[in-house]
Amino acid sequence: MTRRRVIGVDFSGARQAGDHIWIAFGTQIRGCLTLESCFPARQLPNGARDRASALAALRAFLKSERRAAAGLDFPFSLPKPLIPETRWEAFLRAFPGRYPDAGSLRETCRGAAKGRELKRRTDVAARVPFSAYNLRLYRQTHAGIAEVLWPLVESDTARVVPMQAPTPGKVLLAEACPASLLKRLDLYLPYKGRQEAFRDRRLTLLKEFENNSLLTKPDNSLSERIVEDRGGDALDAVLAAVAAANLPRLRRATRDPVERIEGRIYF
């Protein structure tokens, strides 16, 4: 029986990122995910509410999961016209120096694109609402690339698909988008909010994933925790984990010249 450790991360670049980053993890058996836990990053070992502590704890957690596949909900790259390098690894290496903070990322990209918000090819295919440097997303993009992907790749403790080939003993990182997964399955409904109607939708979505054999029914306490999270971050982490559980069996880096630099959203 094929088993795989699976992680889903609903990401945030906010100052209090430890409250807004949620991690779901479990075991995949024949494409179906059995959840074990779901919690905010502040509850990780050495985690806290502030961004620096939360991201350090997240990196340590991912490093420790050497046999896992992880879906992370932030852009792993930028549109190809905004990247001077020909290889993603070179882009990643240059990223922290080129964009020392999130504001410089947004302003530089907007200037290079003459005020337009360009999208990657995968953004269009996945029907994501925003460009990687959109006002609602640029902090998340910067923190994810500079403070998660770069340190993990630079330390040779992770592999990032489809730009890099998987390697045994290193956590496999893939870009996920919960909204894109819901759209693909024709399940996209507003579910974030305090109203009872939104709570009911979060519960409905969990049940739909169970009915589609993508998720084993969580135990009552775990299900309640996911459904009662009003911001939907817990559910988004579960959806990112489902995306990671259904990654194709990748053996080598992509040969697609656009994907090699822009990456791919798995949904």
Image: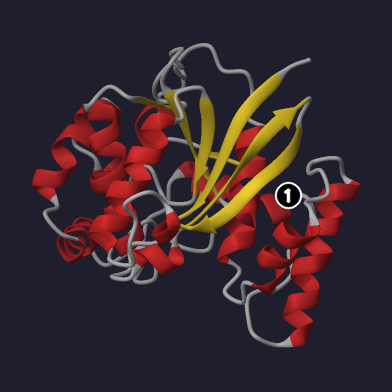
Indicate the secondary structure of the residue bearing disc 1: helix
Question: In which quadrant will I find the N terminus?
Answer: top right
Relative to 44, say whether 241 is above or below: above
Residue 68 rendering spot, x and y as whole percentages? 53, 28
Left or right position of 215 against 264: right
Q: In this view of the protein, can residue 85 be seen by the observer?
A: no
Name the amino acid, label 1. Arg
Which residue is the site of mark 1?
184
Q: Quadrant of residue 159?
A: top left
x, y percentage for residue 172? 47, 27
Q: Position of residue 91 (x, y in %)?
A: 22, 34
Q: How many marks?
A: 1
Q: Is residue 120 above or below residue 87?
A: below
Q: Residue at x 47, y 19 (%)?
A: 254
The answer to whether any part of residue 18 appears in the image is: yes
Seen in the picture, residue 41 relative to 213 is either above or below; the reply is below
Question: How far from the left and from the top, in percent, is residue 186?
Answer: 80, 56
